[in-house]
Image: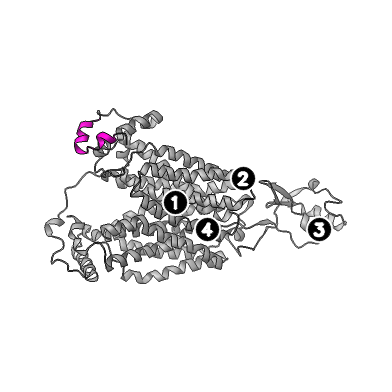
Amino acid sequence: MGDYDEDTAFLGQTGPYFWSTFFLLNAVYISTGFNGLYIVFVGATPKHHCLIPDVNLTEEWRKAIIPSKVVDGEEELSKCSRYRLDEVRNLSAQGFVPGRDVNLTELGQEGCLDGWSYSRDIYQSTIVTEWDLVCDEEWKVPFASSTLFVGYLFGSLISGQLSDRFGRKKVLFISLAAQCVSVLLQSFSHSWTMFCIIFLFVGASQISLYISAFVLGTEVLSKSMRVLFTTLGAFLFYCIGYMTLPWIAYGVRQWRTLLAILSSVAVVYIPLWWFIPESPRWLLSQGRVEEAEAILRDAARKNKVEAPPVIFKESELEAFPLTKKYTMLDILKSSNIRCITLMSLLLWMAINIGYFGLSLNTSNLSGSPFMNCFLSATSEVPAYIVSTWLLHKCPRRALLSSFLIIGGGVLLLIQFIPDTLQYVSLAMEMTGKFGFTMAFSVVYIYTAEIYPTVLRNVGIGMCSSAARIGSITAPYVIYLGSYNKFLPYILMGSLTIGSSVVNLFLPETLNKDLPETVEQMQECRGYVHLQQSVTEFFPTLCRGPKKKAYNLEKCGRRNPSVLREVKF
């Protein structure tokens, strides 16, 4: 295949065709925004205590039957125990007054044998209140959250293969339909197990939708609009859906109804089938030249330009000779690339733990969970805008480390904020989310620039898998807050600060040509200095076969700037 961008240059860089496709594809991301984190409200845990059955007790004993204990310096009612009902009933019948005639600490305690009583001040129902996912069953809430991210992992592994075989457009709309049906079926779950199983399909369909729309946009849009779409458009429209979610949840406090409403929104996307085109690049790769040309001629008509009589010459459609296909084993062969990949995996994992951890934690913050979720989503908008602007001017390594230090540093400081200054803690958590979001947007581009073309897809795929492991872990990190409310912040903050140090060993990529081959990556981008530096810290992981001496003169002839920037 010839140069597609040159063959389609007659369409221009902007126009009605590109702008309509840009907004229609971005509109799809709105649905991923409010379907991605509804577990924040569906899996929320209201205030609760043991249910007191309707037995003959005085009002004093009904108030005193729930023990109180000190948690994080504050006294609160026990959530998982009560004084033995038979003892309390006998004392009440004898006319004893709790605290005056009876020392409550001497009474025996028992679990919540009759279930729990839940506060309905905020939520009418959640999966927690319906299936009593508290106390000994509390672990099931973070497990349910993790099933979504396990679905992400499976979906990201298969969506690319499906779209390569059946087409970008078909997989996009099949994923959209699968997401709608999965969320709707989830609203009819009759057990926690069924809820988790369906949540796997929700996650798989959602990430498949995200990836297929992303790939379709990069292949259909012009060069200039492609950059806007991949660096800002998709993220901002995701934020619109994310910011919409808390207000839908505010109006609908029952989890089954909320899911039914969220699934029904997909209906508005049905007409988009007739407006979003298939990728001409993919059609060409399948030998369907006439269909590709038909789409491009329709695009020329919408852009009010004239298409050439022959868009793709027959000589240009001849396949190139087969080239070597690279796999994960090629990454492991080179000590330099092996070290780079290891550090990249740690970065992606730490960033995802922090990002999704803070996103899932909004329902646990003081104040309104709906407003907290909205603020968390709103903080992402300036983060994406600022990071996109800075990426054009600032070194990637310093930029990413700065964002990680901001995100992790404020989380470590939260533990020192007095309980009387809850708004300060909330502001610091939103600042942390701001830092993680900027790091999230930078690490995608940074990783793509580090790997050579022949390994870029494999490298990013491995990093994406590490990101899924991080997101699967995030709910359990937040779950640690049930033991100590500062423990999740300390863990996420420490992990992030550590990853910012690891990031300093990665090579700089600003204003550097993207490497095409493994040899270019190792020869001309300061990787020799990287190997020497990292080997001192990771001697076992980075040990490999003896390499040839670094040919600085040869590299300098190809890229003179390397003579000055060998230590990036």
Amino acid at pointer 4 = Cys
Q: Which residue is mark 3?
A: 60
Of discs 3 and 1, which sits in the foreground?
Answer: 1
Relative horizontal placement of residue 273, taking residue 143 as reference (left or right)? left
Magenta stretch? 550-566
Q: Nearer the viewer, mark 4 or mark 2?
A: 4
Give how far across and how far down residue 274 sits, in percent: 31, 71
Whole-angstrom CA distance, mark 1 to mark 4, is 15 Å
Label whose residue precedes the other's in the sequence (4 or 3): 3
> The disc labelled 3 sits on which kind of residue?
Glu
> Which residue occupies 55% across, 64% down?
255
- Give the SS element for disc 3: helix
Residue at the spot 28% in from the left edge and 61% down from the top edge: 221
Image quarter of residue 315:
bottom left
For disc 1, the marked residue is 437
- Residue under label 4: 373
406 or 28, which lies in front?
A: 406
Q: Give residue 189's position: percent from left, percent from top.
A: 53, 62
Kindly identify the amino acid type of the residue bearing the numbered disc 2.
Answer: Tyr
> What residue did someone put label 2 on?
483
Q: Earlier in the sequence, mark 1 or mark 2?
A: 1
Among numbered discs 4 and 2, the one appearing first in the sequence:
4
Q: Nearer the viewer, residue 327 or 296?
A: 296
Distance in Å between CA atoms under marks 1 and 2: 27 Å
